Amino acid sequence: MTAMSRLGAGLGARLRAALGADRAPDEAAWAEAEEVLVAADLGPRLAAEVVVEAWKRTAGGDVSAHAAISAELGERLRRVPDHPFEVGPPPAVILVVGVNGSGKTTTAAKLAARFQKEGRSVLLAAADTYRPSAVEQLRLWGDRLGIGVVAQRAGADPAAVAFDAVAAGVARGIDVVIVDTAGRLQTARDLMAELAKVRRVITRQRPDQPRHVLLVLDASTGQNGLSQAETFLAEAGVTGIVLAKMDGTAKGGVALAVVDQFGIPIAFTAFGEEVGDLAPFDPAAYLDWLLAA
């Protein structure tokens, strides 16, 4: 998380420029601050609500506008219960979903490395069968980490791959089975229906699984991230967010918008290309990153 904080999204400097040093900015300054929040991908509704509530916080004159906005954003994050990410009894199945280019396959590998470091046995399932490169990428990660990968030929039924992986997980006494699903646009209805099928196949084998369905969101995805979250929530039953690509170019505000609108917690943040660049979500560090100068 220190790496994430060091990179920063740069929102803080833009807010300070809009609000100035005055503890009681005028209406025009607050309007400019709202525009800054919209540009940071919070979205018009959330940006307007944050500004209104922050304005109220400054009414007593003892809190700066910038501090009031930071406090309001923090409160929004805390509205979603902060539970530790628990793997659960084996074999725990984790379904990793997201659109192409979000960093989904790399995130699956980072999760596998994290659980492996914790002393858990892990099995990867290459259910992104529409992209031979994704299957190969996961195999390379598996070789690098010394983790088994269940895969079939290109174009195979993703649900069949998931079925085989869960069955292998049970047979081998594996602690965690991570299923990398096809990276798809959330507007592709036939593919989204297939994702729902993958989930059904897993549940039929193990009624208490998948334990987690993690949606990988690119931190620079903009307001399209809200559409992604809404659709994947409906089709796959998303239980948590992995905020990926937390580099210096990302705006990152869409994560807060998703949490606020859908009540989906952020489970992890990924902020680099190395396998260890994944950490449990820390609301305070996220706000530091988002509001960095």
Image (spheres, rainbow, N blue to C red):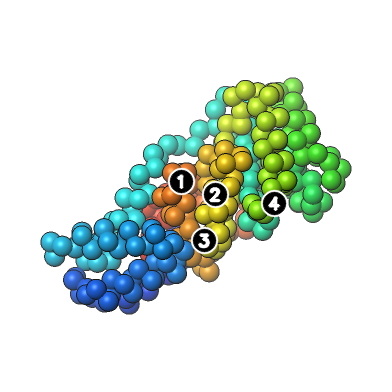
Q: Amino acid at mark 4?
A: Ala
Residue 130 lies, in percent from the top left, at: 79, 49
- On screen, residue 74 versus residue 228, left or right, reads left
Query: Which badge, 2 or 3, comes first in the chain's sequence?
Result: 3
Q: Residue furthest front?
A: 189
Instruction: Identify the element where label 1 is drawn.
Output: helix
For the residues labelled 4 and 3, the Cα–Cα distance comes to: 18 Å
Query: Which badge, 2 or 1, comes first in the chain's sequence?
Result: 2
Residue 144 lies, in percent from the top left, at: 73, 47
Q: Which residue is mark 3?
A: 223
Please identify, in this view, whether the residue under mark 1 or under mark 4 is nearer the observer.
4
Q: Circles 2 and 1: CB distance less than 8 Å?
A: yes
Q: Which residue is mark 1?
A: 262
Q: Amino acid at mark 1?
A: Phe
Q: Which residue is mark 2?
A: 229
Residue 167 visible in the picture:
yes
